[in-house]
Amino acid sequence: MNTSDNKATLSFSDGSPSVEFPIYKGTVGPDVIDIRKLYAGTGKFTYDPGFMSTASCNSSITYIDGDKGELQYRGYPIEQLAVNADFMESCYLLLNGELPNNVQKQEFVDTVTKHTMVHEQMQFFFRGFRRDAHPMSVLVGTVGALASFYHDSLDINDAKQREISAIRLIAKMPTLVAMAYKYSMGQPFMYPRNDLSYSANFMRMMFGNPCEEYKVNDVLVRALDRILILHADHEQNASTSTVRLAGSSGANPFACIAAGIACLWGPAHGGANEAALTMLKEIGSVDNIPAFIEQVKDKNSSVKLMGFGHRVYKNFDPRAKLMRETCYEVLEELGLQDDPLFKLAMELEKIALNDEYFVSRKLYPNVDFYSGIVQSALGIPVSLFTGIFAMARTIGWIAQWNEMIADPEQKIGRPRQLFVGSTVRDVKPLDQR
């Protein structure tokens, strides 16, 4: 952090003395006012529900400019990473700060590949769940349970042990997600294959079976790989902040990632692509789109347009254009251009991109709109969409957690409050209440 020559002065209308706060400059993005000594100096807190104006940490991992529609991992634009790198290279970048060369990439891929199996006893954890359990509840439980198997890497102050934990989480998440799917289907678990790429291995564990050899489709594998890259990290969002907050207490990395999965499970966060696909199914057919659009525009209607617009991106979601390309590639590869659901999605996209109501409000299709369509085309059930999201975001969570643990300024998270409850009062005996 670089201290600015400028200072922020807070003055009070009640005659209390003014106080000055230092201003820090990042490499890009808005300056921040350091208010850490606000309470000590004034006896007052700030009030910021949702932390909309609060920087909770300094980070060198991911940068977002919502107004310009920019997303960068370690300075690299997402548009370039999605085209010129694969998910494993993106993982290496997020963890280590630089893209790998050939040798570094091969070593990293080999290490991850050799950690993809989970302990055989994990199968018994799955048997404890109902077959219709939501995959996210299964993942919260099984990821948290990993801490029971790896006592050799739970010292968070040991950089080497943090690295081992990071590799284990990246490697085992696809295996656990695929196991959750197979369990729900009543099918046998598929063990990982060391001769396949990260994304191809996941596809095989999901859709292969012991009766026949699984045929890898490069177009579909590339589509999944792009989904993973585009969802790998997104700065200090709700689930990442949850991981950091849990980690600030010294909790082990498996517990912290389980906490992140629990937060991601919320429909306002990780469930957006599921909501977008549910909306398409409710519309039903292309013929019903005009009536649906009218309902969306009606202020008195509760109907919402899901998969359009974004809380951070006020212009367009840079991931959406990339996901759109992948969407069309997958539909063409699988011959699904005439599938009623996908025709409906493409027609809705066309209307939203040309209708003045949506254009003026910058309600462009976001990454969730397209990724839901792609995942559905790949054969991934709607209930597992958020599980795929968690698989992708694990690298972001673990990179952010690792950065936080190594930060000398990190403290246990402890937000304050504006108390609006009752003032002190006496407890009366039971017969007088």
Image (tube, rainbow, N blue to C red):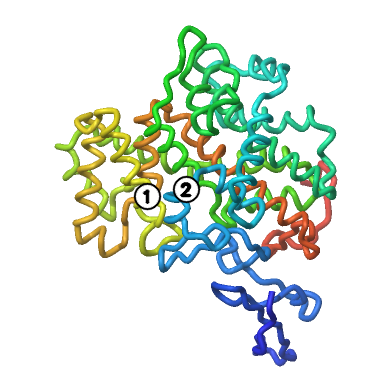
Q: Secondary structure at mark 2?
A: helix
Q: Secondary structure at mark 1?
A: helix
| Residue identifier under label 2 | 230
Q: Check disc 1 and give the amino acid type.
A: Leu
Along the viewing direction, whichever of 232 and 286 lies nearer the viewer: 232
Numbered disc total = 2
Tell me the quarter of the picture where residue 215 sits.
top left
The image shows residue 130, relative to residue 253, as above or below, that is above
Q: Check disc 2 and give the amino acid type.
A: Leu
Q: Residue at x 36, y 41 (%)?
A: 276
Circle 2 residues within 10 Å: few <14, some 14–19, many ≥20:
many
Mark 1 and 2 residues: CB-CB less than 8 Å, in contact? Answer: yes
Left or right side of 142 for 73: left
From the image, which quarter does the N terminus lie in?
Answer: bottom right
Left or right side of 162 for 260: left
Q: Residue furthest left?
A: 287
Q: How far apart are the alpha carbons under marks 1 and 2?
A: 8 Å
